[in-house]
Amino acid sequence: MKVLFVCTGNTCRSPMAQAIFTHKAKEQKLDMTADSAAISLTYGERVNPKAIEALKKLGITGFSHLSQPVTPQLIDESDFIVTMTWQQRAALAAITDDGKLAAFCEFSPSGDVPDPYGQDQEAYDKCAQTLAKGIDLLIPYLKGRFLL
């Protein structure tokens, strides 16, 4: 099964979610993969160094990703799509099956995942921790829903 994480620019939140999800799925020996993309038309930007540092603090190293926009192909290849905000979910609902779409806050009691872009390292660390906690709830949901 493949999960697509979506945020605004695909350099902070969604790549961190991709890395955390992939790490946790491997730890649990699950046949799950992840990718990430942007609502905006960004191509080829590297993950923010502060996001990489936040991932290292969670024990995730060696992650690299270049930004990409959401495309019909990415949507078709994905079994489930998770946006960082309700607004992003609403934007994608117009172009994909609502049954395979969710906002991150549906799995995390913290609400929308705040964008750390342009903020200090602490904001990135907090974002990564929020994502990790939500993914701990997302994985069991996916296992139950897709009978993995």
Image (cartoon, grey):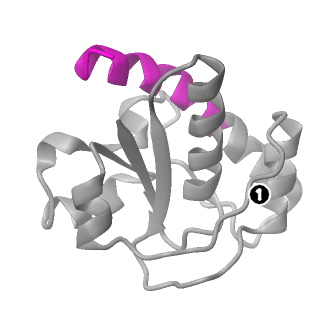
- 112 lies left or right of 127: left
Find numbered disc 1 in the image and state the secondary structure of the residue it sits on: helix
Please state the horizontal and vertical placement of residue 51, each as a whole percent of the image: 77, 57
Comparing 27 with 96, the one in front is 27
Q: Position of residue 13 (x, y in %)?
A: 60, 56
Give above or below for 22 relative to 11: above
Q: Is residue 114 left or right of residue 108?
A: right
Quadrant for the N terminus, please: top left
Q: Position of residue 114 (x, y in %)?
A: 58, 54
Q: Where on the picture, by quarter, is residue 61?
A: top right
Q: Which residue is found at the position 24% from the left and 20% from the top? A: 145
| Depth order, front residue of 45/107 | 45
Q: Position of residue 45 (x, y in %)?
A: 65, 81
Which region is colored magenta?
130-148
Compared with 134, 64 (above or below) is below
Q: Magenta part mainly helix, strand or loop?
A: helix
Disc 1 crowd rating (10 Å Cα; few below 14, some 14-19, many 20+) is many
Quadrant hosting residue 105: top left
Q: Is residue 139 magenta?
A: yes
In this rendering, would 143 be left or right of 123? left
Q: Report the residue at 68% width, 46% height from top.
A: 127
Above or below, comparing residue 139 to residue 112 in the picture: above
Amino acid residing under circle 1: Ala
Task: Count the labels in the image.
Answer: 1
Q: Residue at x 41, y 29 (%)?
A: 107
The residue beneath circle 1 is: 51
**Magenta-colored stretch includes residue 144:** yes
